[in-house]
Amino acid sequence: MQKHPTPTEGEGASLSRRNFITMAAASTAATLPSVALAEASGKTSRLPLPLDQQFDICVANLRNVLMAMHPEVIQIEVDYHPFNHGRNFSLVMIGHRPRRGGAR
């Protein structure tokens, strides 16, 4: 168990340089493995994703933003249609609110 240096009665609240360096070194050593792991795992997420996955992520993020902007919407319909041999496209997003008075 770690002992935290606390001033006793009659002593000042200052730490000695040696105690400060020892505590700093111990906290750095304890933190280093988790920082290295986080940095290593972050590098894999920087790899470029295929365009279809980037598109799906983008549409999901846009859907989340639209749902936050329009909380009454219960469903967002997405239609993506490339045409003209992929040179042009159409992207339509439609938000649906619940029907009033039940289903018809």
Image (cartoon, rainbow, N blue to C red):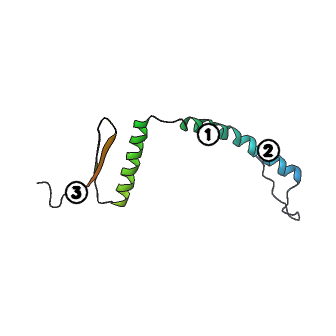
Write the residue at 85% across / 56% down.
15
Coordinates of residue 51 in the picture (x, y in percent): 43, 37
Label 3: element kind: loop
Q: Quadrant where the N terminus lies? A: top right
Q: Is residue 16 left or right of residue 32?
A: right
Mark 1 crowd level (few <14, some 14–19, many ≥20, 10 Å Cα): few
Task: Work out whether 81 lies above or below 11.
Answer: above
Label 1 with label 3: CB-CB less than 8 Å: no
* Quadrant hosting residue 31: top right
Tally of numbered discs: 3
Task: Report x, y in % for residue 56.
Answer: 38, 41
In the image, residue 67 lies at what x, y percent? 35, 55
Upstream in the sequence, badge 1 or badge 2?
A: 2
Report the mark closest to the observer, 2 or 3: 3
Q: Which residue is mark 1?
A: 38
Which amino acid lies under the numbered mark 1 shown in the image of this protein? Ala
- Amino acid under label 2? Ala
Q: Position of residue 38 (x, y in %)?
A: 61, 39
Residue designated by label 3: 98
Residues packed near mark 3 inside 10 Å, few (<14), some (14 to 19) or many (20 plus) = few
Q: Which mark is residue 64?
A: none
Q: Nearer the viewer, residue 99 or 61?
A: 61
Of helix, strand and loop, which one carries label 1?
helix
Image-based side of 29 in relation to 41, left or right: right
Q: Is residue 18 left or right of residue 78?
A: right
Residue 16: quarter of image: bottom right
Residue at 51%, 36% (x, y): give it: 48
Where, quadrant-wise, is the C terminus in this rendering?
bottom left
Residue drawn at (38%, 46%), measured in percent from left and top?
Answer: 60
Residue 81, above or below 18: above
Q: Amino acid at mark 3?
A: Pro
Query: Mark 2 = which residue?
Result: 25
